[in-house]
Amino acid sequence: MTNTTTSKDVANDVAETTGTIAEKASATYASAKESVTDAAAKSRDAVSSAAKSTAETVKAHPGATAAIVAGAAAAIAGAAFGASKLIEKKREADATPKVPPSAT
């Protein structure tokens, strides 16, 4: 008895394998979608909770909140001023012509 593979047998094998791959891909997609949905819900809950906590803290301690905001604004303004001075110095240095020392 000879074992011969016909093109029909090959086509059936390919169709079966393709179906199995499609089923696995579909299951993987469904699992990934569920994971992303769960992560999004957890993130939304965490952000909501943080926002609520921040709002409650601001209401409970308005003076401290104002001091923190003023300090942060001063730090940002100081950093911006320092950066502008550094940029100004660099421009002045670049504008000064560089003359090589004369060979004597």
Image (cartoon, rainbow, N blue to C red):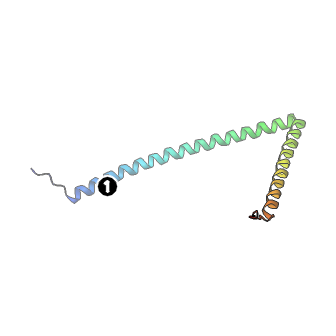
Q: 10 Å neighbourhood of mark 1: few (<14), some, or many (≥20)?
A: few
Q: Residue at x 36, y 49 (%)?
A: 20
Residue lying furthest left? 1
Residue lying furthest front? 104
Q: Secondary structure at mark 1?
A: helix
> Residue 23 placed where, x, y %?
40, 49
Q: Residue at x 76, y 62 (%)?
A: 101
> In the picture, which quadrant includes the C terminus?
bottom right
Tag 1 residue: 15
Quarter assignment of residue 56: top right
Residue lying furthest right? 63
> Residue 45 placed where, x, y %?
68, 40
Q: Is residue 97 left or right of residue 63?
A: left
Reply above or below: 8 against 53.
below
> Residue 53 placed where, x, y %?
77, 36
Quarter assignment of residue 15: bottom left
Q: Is residue 13 left or right of residue 65?
A: left
Reply above or below: 14 against 75.
below
The foreground one among 66 and 1 is 66
Q: Amino acid at mark 1?
A: Ala
> Residue 61 placed where, x, y %?
87, 34
Q: Residue at x 84, y 54 (%)?
A: 85
Q: Is residue 54 left or right of residue 41?
A: right
Q: Residue at x 27, y 57 (%)?
A: 11
Number of marks drawn: 1
